[in-house]
Amino acid sequence: MSDRQPAPASGSELNAALEDLLRRADANGVSVEGGWDCVDSGPHPNWDVVVTAVERRDE
């Protein structure tokens, strides 16, 4: 991403950043449901990210 926002420093900040990313992707017509491999060639671990839509109780 080209936005230079501070990196999340807590679980709640990570959650907020993910929510923002998913909303912006959805607004741009990107299908955000599915799975992605996040592979790092450096010292960080690799991750498997899965996004699933969840029905709201008020719907």
Image: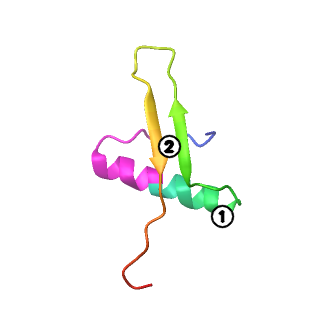
Q: Which residue type carries mark 2?
A: Gln
- Residue 47 is situated, as x and y percent measured from the top left of the image, at 43, 31
**Which residue is tagged 2?**
5
The quarter in which the C terminus is drawn is bottom left
Alpha carbon distance from label 1 to label 2: 20 Å
Residue sitting at 44 percent across and 25 percent down?
Answer: 46
Taking the view exactly as shown, the residue that stands out farthest to the right is 29
**Which residue is tagged 1?**
27
Q: Which residue type carries mark 1?
A: Ala
In the picture shown, does residue 6 fall above or below 41? Answer: below
Q: Quadrant of residue 44?
A: top left
Q: Nearer the viewer, residue 16 or 46?
A: 46
- The answer to if 4 sits in the magenta stretch is no
Report helix, strand or loop for mark 1: helix
User: Are the two marked residues, 1 and 2, in contact with CB atoms closer than 8 angstroms?
Assistant: no
The quarter in which the N terminus is drawn is top right
- Which segment did they paint magenta? 5-18
Residue sitting at 62 percent across and 61 percent down?
Answer: 26
Q: Nearer the viewer, residue 24 or 36?
A: 36
Q: Say left or right for 30 vs 37.
A: right
User: How has the structure been colored for display?
Assistant: rainbow
